[in-house]
Image: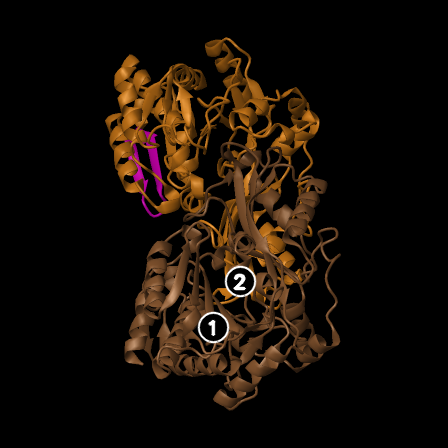
Chain colours: A orange, B brown
Amino acid sequence: MERNLKILEDFLKIPTISAQNKGLKEARDFLTSILRELNFEVRVFPKEEVIFASTRDNSSQSKKTLLFYNHYDVQPPEPLSQWQSEPFQPVVKDGRIIARGVADNKGDLIVRLLAVKELLQEAQGKLPCKVKFILDGQEEIGSPNLEKFARAHPKLLEADGCIWEGGSRTSEGRLTLELGYKGILSVELVVKTAKNEMHSSYGGIAPNAAWRLTSALSSLRDTRGRILIKGFYDNVKKRDKEAKELLKKLPTSWRVELKEAGVRKSFFPSSNTQSKKRLYFSPEINIDGITSGYQGKGHKTILPPEAQAKIDFRLVPNQKPEEILRKLKVHFKKKGFNELKILSRSGYPAGQTSPKHPYVKLISRVVKEVSGKEPILYPNSPGSSPQYLFSSRMPCVGIGIGHPKARVHGANENVLLKDLIQGVRIIKEIITAFK
Amino acid sequence: MERNLKILEDFLKIPTISAQNKGLKEARDFLTSILRELNFEVRVFPKEEVIFASTRDNSSQSKKTLLFYNHYDVQPPEPLSQWQSEPFQPVVKDGRIIARGVADNKGDLIVRLLAVKELLQEAQGKLPCKVKFILDGQEEIGSPNLEKFARAHPKLLEADGCIWEGGSRTSEGRLTLELGYKGILSVELVVKTAKNEMHSSYGGIAPNAAWRLTSALSSLRDTRGRILIKGFYDNVKKRDKEAKELLKKLPTSWRVELKEAGVRKSFFPSSNTQSKKRLYFSPEINIDGITSGYQGKGHKTILPPEAQAKIDFRLVPNQKPEEILRKLKVHFKKKGFNELKILSRSGYPAGQTSPKHPYVKLISRVVKEVSGKEPILYPNSPGSSPQYLFSSRMPCVGIGIGHPKARVHGANENVLLKDLIQGVRIIKEIITAFK
């Protein structure tokens, strides 16, 4: 394992921050070199920030194809002050690896490469089935080019089943299999009311961009989170019986994550039923950040001429990002926020795989065999992923090395070493069983 | 004038940013040295950040005392990118001096010192009346120690009339005399919902400090600016007939300032009557800055665990800052914002001088004689100043070298050289007439 850990550590040291267009070329070089060593046919699409890799025709025992989707970009590590170690200097401590991206999604990517490597070594260079990798370098900024890639190269996406980028496990070690992902629409809102700051004594007659933005944001939802954009819920697909049954059985594992993040007790949700619905089946709107005016020490009494917010919508099946964006624009116009501009939109719709599919049963069986525990089927993940591009063509299951205290997207992101080792075994068995 | 300009320039080079506790000692040394050269008795109160200076008993022709209040601190210069020159490197260009603090309030302070200097030179070291200076180093952060100073040293504040820190003129050169100032209450709001960031996919069940703060701020006023804190308007003093008459006559000069700040046309107020009321007679609430979550490039989909806002209230006669603060706390508690904390409050009440006072008539007459134009009496300034400490003891009039494009508190703050020269003449004539 130690030599393998070295590969993961080297990968984690590359600060692949897609939001800042950093480290991506270096990561492409790193990954293509490993894939070529494994005798994969590799094609790099730098413009779409995608790496495609496939086993050669003569190096698999069956013609069936298993496709792995992963991403090599990570979220920005800020705020740095909350990290106990450098985010891009992986640290092994108390049985875990701590680094930005180790849980989302570099750990899983390396686990899958290692599984392939071991299988090749064990079977003289032949895999049980054909394997493809589609590695995305822009997942954390909404995969803006993946759809274009999929449209331009439909042949590359052809496969019989897909293992999606990640998954988690409960604190009791039951793995989660994710059968669907929410869609997303990320937008930046900019309010510009003037060119320069004014003295705040003019507050009664001059505009204040911070007030305008605050009002604009408040107009988007009520205090309980119901979204007030006209027609926002129009196309939301009703969930079928199977999905609802699975939902009921899901554990309330989020309490661990809320606790881990130090959420104030008063904010813990009171109803589990309601929380499950919100988390897995409901579209949501979220503020990721706001900035306006004076933020330094002490007071500066001014009217900010500009205010910005980054927001994201989590979408459910049948909601189209471009339609939501249009409705958002209509909303602001109708409310009179003509000075508000929407910048840097990105997003994709939700994706789903039926829990009844034989592929889902096969993966469940393998997971149970290796881990000794029945996995938990999630009809949907709370997270977003451009899975729709794949799940519209083949069954897709998300499985990975995450755990409830992994702090995905947060400071001190981590995975457990034992989950890494188990992860490699599970992927090996899936590839073997799939043939 | 050139040598005198040098004094002003040297003063402007000291970055006296009280909000950051910068440059204040240097400014105290600078000012006390000038005042001692002018044969003033000087007392420095470093803890209260106040300089007191008074003519000696034998150096005035009359026993009547004129008190000047000025401040030597300035607003922070940020955002620096909007400045055409360095804020603390004064530049003379097109007949104006550009530097942070030149209009508010360092220019006026130096004008008054120069007027005293010239009078002393012209009359062999004797001034027509006794002169006192109270120089405040914390005006821009709400003069948190001035009240304590005034209480501890009531004798030092004894005088027959007071010239307040500043004033402006219309674009036609009519000087404005300010007879009252709004009070102020500045507070910092901090919302903490968790210790760490969470992935924004938890938005449906986990708290978001940015949403909480946005809701809290929105609960404070309606979209037209009416403040929704219970009892906020309870004690607002009705204005008397004289003040109302003066208000009617006031020019709508704010249009120049709105234009100067590049305010979007759609935000120009439509009603002049309504605007006058808001600007001069109404209490207001203002957001000075907001900060929360991710503000870097691109997107980071997180739930911010913390959000902060700096706000200020502009108060009118009879509103007490401590009472408003109490009502604000009750408001947030009643609305359920228990996680919201109020930090770093500071403030003082409004102050007023009657337009009928003979002192006001004297100042008006002198201004008309020197400038050739009838001044405009402002029953109230839109701005705040701790004038109540003085106007409760003697008549107070604000007069200064400001102009409509002075950009007070903003980037490229400036005064006109010709207004500086006229300013010295006016102050000399006021001191002379006051005896």
Residue bearing mark 2: B157
Can you give x and y, in whole percent of width and height, for residue B170 in the image? 53, 82
First along the sequence among labels 2 and 1? 1
Residue bearing mark 1: B130
Q: Which of A123 and A58 is in front in this view?
A: A123
Q: Which chain carries label 1?
A: B
Which secondary structure type mostly characterizes the magenta part of the structure?
strand
Q: For the residue marked with disc 2, what is the amino acid?
A: Leu
Above/below status of B212 relative to A240: below
Can you give x and y, in whole percent of width and height, for residue B397 in the image? 56, 73
Q: Quadrant of residue A265?
A: top right
- Residue B260 inside the magenta-drawn segment: no
Mark 2 or 1, closer to the camera: 1
Above/below status of A79 relative to B252: above
How many numbered tags mark residues here? 2
Residue B60 horizontal side relative to residue A45, left or right: right
Q: Can residue B121 be seen in this view?
A: yes
- Residue A55 inside the magenta-drawn segment: yes
Q: How crowded is mark 2: few (under 14 residues within 10 Å), some or many (20 or more)?
A: many
Q: In which quarter of the image is the N terminus of chain B?
A: bottom left
Name the secondary structure under disc 1: strand
* Magenta part of the chain: A40-56
Residue A38 horizontal side relative to residue B95, left or right: left
